[in-house]
Image: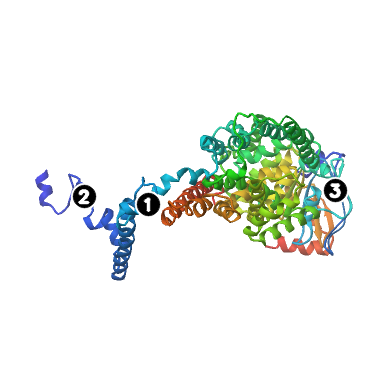
């Protein structure tokens, strides 16, 4: 049979050909290179030129970085060891590490306190950022501000305790009254909290314990990257809810609320942040009762929060405007009241649209916390420009210090940016 | 069909509108509307665009505010009191031309949201009710999808189920089939016909004249913000009285 087959014109394949790899020029990195780097002669020239530039940059920086010294005690010693060779004096970072992170006045034996607060913060933030985590973790989030305050500032535990009790009392009163009327519940809750805080403040003032578990650290001792993180975290977490309230206020049908929101937003947006910070430093004291001595940290937090909440309000207003009117009507037609419609229907969608804008402002805000160095607060940049560069040991080390500052900020900001992109993908349910 | 339908209508008044007027700025959109709807009655409202028919039914659940006259729904008088408005809205279901489902919630969540938050129904019970009505509109298998994954006809049926989950006593339809492909219109109309046969009080703004003939007790023709003519469907279509109605019918039935 096979004989007849081999002599006939018809053809039957009896064994399958084994698969072969594509030619070397058409696979893997060579194919990629041909398509992307050397597709045309002009393209090839540009590639070579770019490679040369990269070589120039790296040949300068890599020996500088890898030839750097980490253990010298001063710039003079470092230069002596380098002996004209190109190399970084990273030893300024190791020598002044604690100053860069905690500032130069925070008590040495208390460094564990902000460090612990930072670690708890990671746990407290997690359930807010990743909503697949168990909701019970939010209890940690709720308690975190009070615990962190006590850890960082120290002093009597009664201060954060009464602050916490005030919040709880306010919430209980709110939840009792809100069934009748939202405004009644809101203002009742605020009033109850303020009363509790006043009583608590009087009690703490009367006892005035001097011998406390954690040594009290005044705000002016805070510094370094810790101060940037504290300002950044506090201001972002305050300005998002305030921004939402302002955005809703601007859309309100009640003229008083609407115009208050509009005036606040337009005024704050029209003033540079640095001006507001000088106001916080010098003038805000006039607005508080004399002798109350409101803390500089608190004053700066108020100013940065006001500034960024005005911007966030405008971003969220954009998100609200992007929602079709039908969403409001559908929520209304089902009998949802205003707070329910906002919380369940409108804000989840508007905030999702606003994520890129909000994150943009959060990143900007975090970097803007370095501006406090101009009102003589010693944040990371303030520490570098002040105590470290002014010292005889390290006068003249610029690249290493500012490179380090840039790296720290970049890590945090890039993390925020990556998170927001993950969040957008996670929330994409509209299948548009 | 018309005879059996009429027998289901009770004497109880579901909606009573007396001498109602509405203006947009200085433009007089609704003029002296008087309308009484009895429980179990199915009313189809038609008319040229801009005649105020959508505005009329949107006034019934206060999506639009009226400036003069009285609207009484289920014994509750519509005023600017938010408590009354929310009460009426939770008793009156509404379906929109563009469905207006909530795109960030699944089909099931769309249906359970209002019962859970407005009626304070336990979640499990609300989900059972939602599945019951999703079965009724014949899409229980889509319960875990998002609105964006469904066709227009399916979305409109979900919107009907979402309204029904509130166990409304009255249903309003604002051109429910106008944004649909011809193939999908039928599936939505079938759902509405089924609802009508169960005796639901319905007000329906639509240009589906076949639907009007089949289920309506009364057809209302509006023009320039006024009710021009109302009659039983047979008489309305076969023997229109006003010249404006005759012109309208000749235009929409002419081809």
Q: Quadrant of the N terminus of chain A?
A: top left
* Quarter of the figure with residue B225: bottom right
Residue hosting label 1: A89
Colouring rule applied to residues: rainbow
Chain letter behind tag 2: A
The nearer-to-camera label among 1 and 3 is 1
- Say if residue B183 shows up in the picture: no
Secondary structure type for disc 2: loop
Say which residue label 3 marks. B80
In the rendering, at what x and y percent does residue B121 appear? 71, 32
Residue A72's x, y, as percent?
Answer: 36, 47
State the residue in front, A372 or B67. Answer: A372
In this image, B20 relative to A53: left or right? right
The reply to the same-chain question for discs 1 and 2 is yes
- Residue A247 seen in render: yes
Compute the Cα span from label 1 to label 2. Answer: 55 Å
Q: Please tell me whether residue A136 is drawn above or below residue A337 in the rendered image.
A: above
Subunit ID for the residue under disc 3: B
In three-dimensional space, the C-alpha distance between marks 1 and 3, rounded to whole angstroms, equals 73 Å
């Amino acid at each position: 049979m096979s004989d007849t087959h081999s002599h006939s014109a018809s053809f039957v394949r009896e064994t399958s050909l084994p698969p072969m790899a594509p030619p070397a020029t058409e696979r893997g990195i060579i194919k990629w290179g041909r398509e992307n780097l050397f597709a045309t002669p002009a393209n090839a020239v540009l590639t070579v030129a770019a490679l040369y530039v990269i070589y120039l940059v790296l040949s300068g920086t890599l020996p500088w970085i890898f030839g750097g010294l980490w253990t010298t005690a001063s710039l003079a010693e470092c230069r002596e060891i380098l002996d004209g060779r190109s190399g970084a004096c990273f030893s300024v970072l190791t020598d002044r590490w604690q100053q860069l992170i905690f500032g130069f006045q925070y008590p040495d034996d208390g460094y564990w306190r902000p460090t612990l607060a930072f670690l708890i913060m990671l746990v407290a933030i997690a359930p807010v950022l990743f909503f697949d985590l168990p909701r019970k973790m939010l209890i940690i989030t709720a308690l975190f501000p009070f615990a962190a305050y006590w850890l960082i500032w120290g002093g009597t535990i009664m201060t954060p305790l009464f602050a916490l009790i005030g919040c709880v009392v306010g919430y209980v009163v709110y939840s009792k009254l809100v069934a009748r009327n939202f405004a009644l519940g809101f203002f009742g809750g605020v009033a109850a909290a303020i009363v509790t805080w006043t009583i608590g403040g009087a009690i703490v003032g009367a006892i005035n314990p001097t011998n406390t578990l954690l040594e009290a650290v005044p705000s002016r001792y805070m510094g370094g990257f810790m101060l940037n993180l504290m300002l950044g975290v506090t201001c972002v977490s305050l300005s998002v809810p305030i921004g939402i309230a302002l955005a809703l206020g601007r859309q309100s049908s009640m003229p008083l609320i609407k115009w208050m929101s509009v005036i606040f937003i337009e005024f704050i947006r029209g003033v540079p942040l640095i001006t507001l910070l000088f106001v916080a430093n010098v003038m805000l004291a006039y607005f508080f009762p004399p002798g109350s001595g409101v803390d500089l940290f608190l004053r700066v937090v108020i100013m940065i929060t006001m500034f960024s909440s005005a911007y966030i309000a405008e971003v969220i207003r954009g998100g609200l405007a992007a929602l079709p009117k039908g969403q409001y009507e559908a929520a209304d037609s089902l009998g949802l009241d205003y707070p329910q419609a906002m919380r369940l229907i409108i804000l989840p969608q508007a905030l999702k649209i606003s994520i890129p804008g909000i994150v943009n402002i959060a990143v900007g805000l975090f970097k803007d916390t370095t501006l406090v160095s101009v009102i003589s607060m010693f944040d990371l940049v303030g520490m570098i420009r002040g105590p470290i560069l002014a010292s005889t040991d390290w006068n003249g080390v610029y690249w290493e210090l500012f490179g380090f500052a840039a790296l720290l900020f970049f890590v945090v900001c890039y993390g925020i940016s990556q998170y927001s992109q993950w969040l957008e993908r996670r929330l994409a349910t509209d299948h548009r | 069909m018309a005879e059996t339908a009429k027998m289901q209508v009770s004497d109880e008044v579901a909606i009573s509108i007396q001498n109602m007027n509405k203006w947009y700025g200085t433009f007089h959109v609704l003029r002296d509307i008087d309308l009484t709807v009895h429980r179990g009655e199915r009313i189809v409202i038609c008319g040229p665009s801009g005649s105020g028919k959508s505005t009329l039914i949107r006034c019934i659940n206060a999506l639009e505010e009226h400036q003069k006259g009285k609207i009484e729904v289920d014994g509750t008088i519509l005023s600017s009191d938010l408590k009354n408005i929310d009460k009426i809205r939770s008793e009156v279901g509404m379906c929109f031309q563009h469905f207006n489902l909530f795109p960030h919630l699944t089909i099931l969540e769309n249906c359970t949201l209002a019962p859970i938050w407005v009626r304070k129904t336990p979640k499990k019970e609300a989900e059972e009710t939602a599945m019951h009505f999703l079965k009724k509109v014949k899409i229980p298998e889509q319960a875990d999808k998002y609105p964006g994954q469904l066709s227009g006809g399916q979305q409109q049926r979900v919107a009907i189920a979402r309204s029904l989950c509130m166990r409304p006593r009255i249903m309003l339809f604002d051109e429910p089939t106008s944004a649909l492909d011809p193939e999908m219109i039928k599936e939505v109309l079938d759902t509405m016909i089924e609802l009508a046969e169960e005796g639901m009080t319905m007000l329906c703004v639509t240009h589906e004249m076949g639907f009007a003939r089949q289920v309506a007790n009364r057809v209302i023709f509006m023009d320039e913000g006024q009710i021009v003519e109302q009659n039983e469907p047979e008489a309305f279509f076969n023997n229109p009285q006003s010249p404006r109605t005759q012109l309208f019918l000749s235009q929409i039935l002419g081809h």
